[in-house]
């Protein structure tokens, strides 16, 4: 019979390797320079929250990414590095997005449930860092929809709301596309910029049904991304980014997993017709916490009109609308210094 | 249940031991072990251990001008255990194990082509600190993670080293499906590169 023997050094190497692999947990928390990843388990989903920055004042900015189906760390970059120097920032992969996982039925997914997930995140942060923690909520694009839904459910834990190119009432985007595309195309044609492209935009606008519908909405949305790219190439937008990437996030998210999840959660939300039916405008007066709306002047993906309507209807007595004139859908990347300054000023005033 | 499992393992061990001592068709003589890299290079990287037990073998011998040409077709039972992690985050750690069948063709130049079907697969994710929220209650989860049924398929190539302890290398392209994952299924693609070795009796 063959004897199977392993040398002592091999056994020690295997044990050390196993310990190395299975003991990757950190217990020491440096509140001034957080770099924690925790998961929130809520209603059959496990969702990662990447907590970064300086939480010495226990002030946290919770960020809601776009999509649906983008990634929590899509905000990372120069602007958020500055914000992290002063406050704790929580980057959150929403249900079905990024590195989130779980077992749940498609029928159970709703914006209502996703808003409850955000409130569950707040409870977890309080549990971990103390009930005296203070929160600001920031939502970008689809995160603007989700943030609005969250605040309408319960705004009591938040010191302020920052809407960044948010789709606060998605059903209104359809008409906003038509109006913005028409005015932008006419202006660009008059300036002689990318005339063929802008004529194709006008042609699309003339072809779509005046009544909102899924297919035409999708066509307009796809055209919006191309329009922003064209505006960047023609020198109107400083940064060629639709705000869905983040800086240095490539190795954090498995591209295939991320794409798969994006497609899945995006399809679920699309099939529910949220972008054709959801309109929070009449409920916005119920939101009374201090609010800051930031929008890129050349945002074609969620036109500035969305922020203007939200600003007009929100119930906050302390509210501000800022239009970034060198930006499209991602002012945090095209004008990072101004963006960070405005956010820090708002948080400083209301914390 | 534990009692029956212990008896089964005991009998199996005796059988294994006796077979190994008595004939060329023993478990060890029909089994190749393998160890190798498992992951997708960019995000998830880990280690995979496994074994392949020869079930059926057929040799096709063709007469050629240069001499007889032997092509070997094999069916092997396959079992594997691996762990992978993403070193850039703490969200993608997991253990997987799967069992199935391999069809392998080895040409006269000892180059191999194989297809794996692993209908029995299990993936267990390991999460960092996790808090569960139920209503207003927040509690820390012990041993956080989730279990998924994870069947897989793979195609691969390799090279056989005849009558050597280290009996060859393999390169597999693997696709595993974790289900139920979120509201559906997650396809996970990986590469497996490693070496096979054995404890066969030298003839």
Image (cartoon, coloured by chain):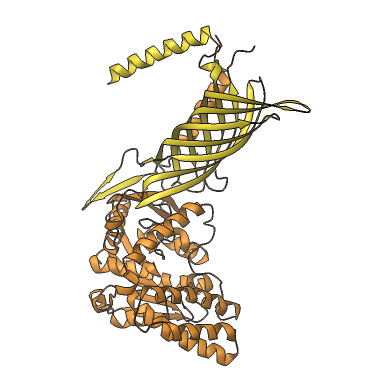
Chain colours: A orange, B yellow
Which residue in the rendered view is the most extreme toward the bottom?
A: A190
Vertically, is A213 above or below A265?
A: below
Residue A177, image x, y percentages: 42, 81
Please identify the quarter of the rendering in which residue A84 is found. Answer: bottom left
Please identify the quarter of the rendering in which residue B30 is found. Answer: top right
Residue A113, image x, y percentages: 27, 59
Residue sitting nearer the eye, B125 or B130: B125
Q: Is residue B75 left or right of residue B121?
A: right
Q: Is residue B47 left or right of residue A345?
A: right
Residue B173, image x, y percentages: 56, 42
Which residue lies at the image location 45% right of the left edge and 64% below the top edge? A83
Please say whether residue A295 is visible from this viewpoint.
yes
Report the number of discs. Answer: 0
Which residue lies at the image location 43% right of the left edge and 62% below the top edge? A86
Vertically, is A142 above or below B40?
A: below
Which residue lies at the image location 53% right of the left edge and 48% below the top edge? B43
Residue sitting nearer the eye, A260 or A271: A271
Q: Is residue B190 left or right of residue B165?
A: left
Which residue in the rendered view is the most extreme toward the right?
A: B66
Vertically, is B106 above or below A277?
A: above
Quadrant containing the N terminus of chain A in the rendered view:
top right
Quadrant containing the C terminus of chain A in the rendered view:
bottom left
Residue A107, image x, y percentages: 28, 57
Please say whether residue A30 is visible from this viewpoint.
no
């Amino acid at each position: 019979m063959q004897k199977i023997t392993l040398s002592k050094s091999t056994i020690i190497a295997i044990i050390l390797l196993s310990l190395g692999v299975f003991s990757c947990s950190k217990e020491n928390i440096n509140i001034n320079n957080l770099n924690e990843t925790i998961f929130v388990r809520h209603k059959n989903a496990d969702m990662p929250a990447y907590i970064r920055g300086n939480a010495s004042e226990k002030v946290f900015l919770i960020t809601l990414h776009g999509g649906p189906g983008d990634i929590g760390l899509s905000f990372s970059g120069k602007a958020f590095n500055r914000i992290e120097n002063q406050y704790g920032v929580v980057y959150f992969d929403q249900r079905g997005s990024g590195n989130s996982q779980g077992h749940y039925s498609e029928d159970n997914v709703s914006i209502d449930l996703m808003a409850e997930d955000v409130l569950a995140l707040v409870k977890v942060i309080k549990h971990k860092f103390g009930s005296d923690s203070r929160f600001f909520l920031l939502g970008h694009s689809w995160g603007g929809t989700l943030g609005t839904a969250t605040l309408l459910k319960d705004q009591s834990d938040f010191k302020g709301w920052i809407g960044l190119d948010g789709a606060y009432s998605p059903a209104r985007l359809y008409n906003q596309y038509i109006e913005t595309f028409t005015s932008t195309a006419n202006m660009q044609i008059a300036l002689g910029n990318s005339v063929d492209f802008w004529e194709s935009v006008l042609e699309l606008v003339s072809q779509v049904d005046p009544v909102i519908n899924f297919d035409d909405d999708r066509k307009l949305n796809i055209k919006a991304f191309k329009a922003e790219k064209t505006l960047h190439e023609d020198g109107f937008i400083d940064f060629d980014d639709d705000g869905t990437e983040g800086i240095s996030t490539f190795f954090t998210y498995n591209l295939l997993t991320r794409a798969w999840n994006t497609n899945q959660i995006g399809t679920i939300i699309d099939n529910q017709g949220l972008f054709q039916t959801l309109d929070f405008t009449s409920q916005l007066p119920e939101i009374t916490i201090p609010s800051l709306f930031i929008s890129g002047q050349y945002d074609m993906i969620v036109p500035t009109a969305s922020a203007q309507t939200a600003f007009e209807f929100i119930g906050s007595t302390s509210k501000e609308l800022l239009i970034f004139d060198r930006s499209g859908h991602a002012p945090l990347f095209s004008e990072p210094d101004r963006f960070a300054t405005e956010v820090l000023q708002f948080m400083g005033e209301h914390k | 249940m534990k009692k029956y499992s212990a008896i089964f393992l005991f009998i199996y061990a005796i059988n294994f031991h006796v077979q190994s001592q008595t004939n060329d068709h023993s478990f060890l003589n029909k089994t190749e072990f393998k160890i190798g890299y498992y992951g997708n290079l960019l995000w998830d990287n880990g280690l995979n251990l496994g074994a392949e037990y020869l079930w059926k073998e057929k040799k096709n011998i063709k007469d050629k001008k240069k001499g007889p040409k032997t092509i070997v077709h094999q069916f092997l039972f396959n079992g594997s255990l691996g762990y992978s992690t993403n070193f850039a985050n703490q969200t993608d750690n997991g253990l997987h194990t799967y069992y199935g069948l391999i069809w392998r063709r080895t040409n006269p130049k000892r180059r191999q082509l194989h297809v794996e079907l692993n209908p029995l697969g299990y993936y267990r994710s390991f999460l960092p600190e996790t808090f569960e929220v139920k209503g207003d209650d927040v509690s820390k989860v012990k041993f956080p993670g989730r279990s998924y049924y994870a069947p897989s398929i793979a195609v691969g190539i390799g090279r056989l080293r005849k009558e050597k302890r280290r009996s060859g290398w393999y390169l597999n392209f693997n696709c595993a499906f974790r289900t139920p994952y979120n509201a559906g299924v997650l396809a996970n693609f990986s590469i497996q590169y490693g070496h096979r070795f054995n404890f066969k009796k030298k003839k």
